[in-house]
Amino acid sequence: MNNSVERLVIASNRLPFIFKKSGNNWKIEAGSGGLVTALAPVLKDRGGLWVGWPGTFELSSISGLLKTASKKAGYTLKSVQITEEEIQQYYLGFSNEVIWPLFHDLQSYCNFDPDYWTFYKSINKRFALILKKATKPKDFIWIHDYHLMCVAQSLREINIKNKLAFYLHIPFPPLDIFSKLPWRTEILFSLLNYDLIGFQSIRDRNNFIQCLKTFIKGLKLKGKGHVINAIINDRIVKIGSFPISIDYKEFSSLAKSKAVADQAWFIHEDIPNNKIILGIDRLDYTKGITYRLRAFQKLLSTHPELHRKLTLIQVLVPSRRNIPMYQELKLEIEQLVSEINGQYTRSGWVPIHYIYRSLSRKELLAYYRTAEIALITPLKDGMNLIAKEYCASNIEKTGSVILSEFAGAAAQMGENVLLVNPYNIDEVAGAIYTAITMDLKTRKNRMIKLQKSIQKYDIYWWLNSFLNAAMAVKLDKFPKLEKIKSTNKLNKNN
Ligand code: F6P
């Protein structure tokens, strides 16, 4: 390990723990997702720090729990206090009514309220002040996602000289869409205060570079490959593409467990002789759910011979329920599901099973394991880890993936999935038909290739390549990951 680096410090909008109130008591649950899985072991071994919002306004009630969670986790958790009004303006407003739709190419969904921007800058500044207080000069500070694009600038303004890196988990839009942002130059200048800026794909990285070339005068670009250098005022900013992934080993070994196998069997047992098409998404307008439902409806209308032979299981995980557009979308989806079910349901067969809740890990893996087809058709997506999780959990290696060409995952998985334009209802209906009728050998060949590549480019590979670009050191110096890597090697050789 480079001795000049003391600790890894992570900042993200949310802390990696969820604080929940049930009655008068507070409960704490570990957060899930790639970021937590990848970074928690590293922080534990390096004595790191994670700064974020705990998801509640009652900070004093959770301070004890926060300490317990820190102790259990093995690294320090530092909460950022944000009021209800600030959440309204910075998180629901600027982050989710401006950046989220714009960066997913849905500019007409944006609400460019100038007050949102004021709050956004002020919360980013608050993160910076907390980071200044809690960090040491040799700490490596890694900021995550679109909620916190301006933290580096605030840190530089208060004279922080640490190495600063940023990773964008969502897409970066093309020039003509980004140009609509009233604060486009400010955001670009802010981002240039980081030493390394990481994107999910070359597509996003190139869009960003195009925007820099247009709006930042005097910027020079050097190098090629997945990381290139931007030179501005004699400073070098590295800009790279680092596709995020999953803990492949964890998913595949859990999916093999008896508990998951049993549950998978029960799911299919309830709908015998039916092929299961699975859609799992956060309830979000970027996921293309209404187009997907229309495509399924089209398939049923053009292929009556498939009636009673296939079931679409659509799981929607509740999300951002305070934003009106999300509430309206829920109603629209539910109306469409009832319309299709009303039209096609026959005794013993309901074409769409609609689930609106979070699934337990076991349930999720069971659905992945048992579904014949994963239908993943976002209108735009940074990566889409569902696509990778489905493959890792496909123990029988017989499943097929239908994937939107606008998901970041398409760049890595495109050759072995059925790529579709999610806006093209006929094409998606056709891809479902192709998947249903695809022969076993082709399906197996494709799934084996997908699994191999996801296993190789897993979450540890992502972490390794990002930190290597940021600090020019190999991650295998981190003890825990060293162990994980050698276990991976052992498994491969067996
Ligand atoms: O995909 C971006 C992201 O911020 C993820 O990191 C997160 O899991 C998801 O969107 C939902 O985020 P939130 O509920 O915090 O808005």
Image (spheres, rainbow, N blue to C red):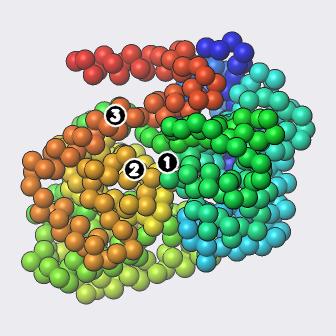
Quadrant of the image occupied by residue 127: top right
Give the amino acid at mark 1. Answer: Ser
Q: Assess whether mark 1 and mark 2 are in contact (beta carbons under 8 angstroms).
A: yes
Q: Where is mark 2, residue-wise?
A: 411
Q: Is 21 located above or below residue 75 in the figure?
A: below
Q: Is residue 257 left or right of residue 478?
A: left
Residue type (three-letter) at the residue carrying disc 2: Ala
Which residue position holds label 3? 455
Q: Residue at x 70, y 43 (%)?
A: 220
Query: Does label 2 or label 1 sit earlier along the sequence?
Result: 1
Instruction: Identify the residue at the far right of this view.
Output: 158
Kindly identify which residue carries mark 1: 201
Q: Quadrant of the N terminus?
A: top right
Which of these two is toward me, 66 or 51? 51
- Determine if residue 260 is in view: no
x 40%, y 35%: residue: 457
Give the amino acid at mark 3.
Gln
Q: Residues within 10 Å of mark 2 (few under 14, many from 20)?
A: some
The reply to whether residue 163 is visible in this rendering is yes
Q: Nearer the viewer, mark 3 or mark 2?
A: 2
Disc 3/disc 2 C-alpha distance (Å): 16 Å
Where is residue 60 drawn, in percent x and y?
80, 44
Identified at 58% across, 61% down, the residue is 173
Q: Which mark sits nearer the N-terminus, 3 or 1?
A: 1
Label 3 to label 1: alpha-carbon separation: 18 Å
Determine whether, in the image, residue 60 is placed left or right of residue 253: right
Between disc 3 and disc 2, whose residue precedes?
2
In front: mark 3 or mark 1?
A: 1
Asked where in the image residue 44 lies, by quadrant, the reply is top right
Neighbourhood count class around disc 1 (C-alpha, 10 Å): few under 14, some 14–19, many 20 upward = many
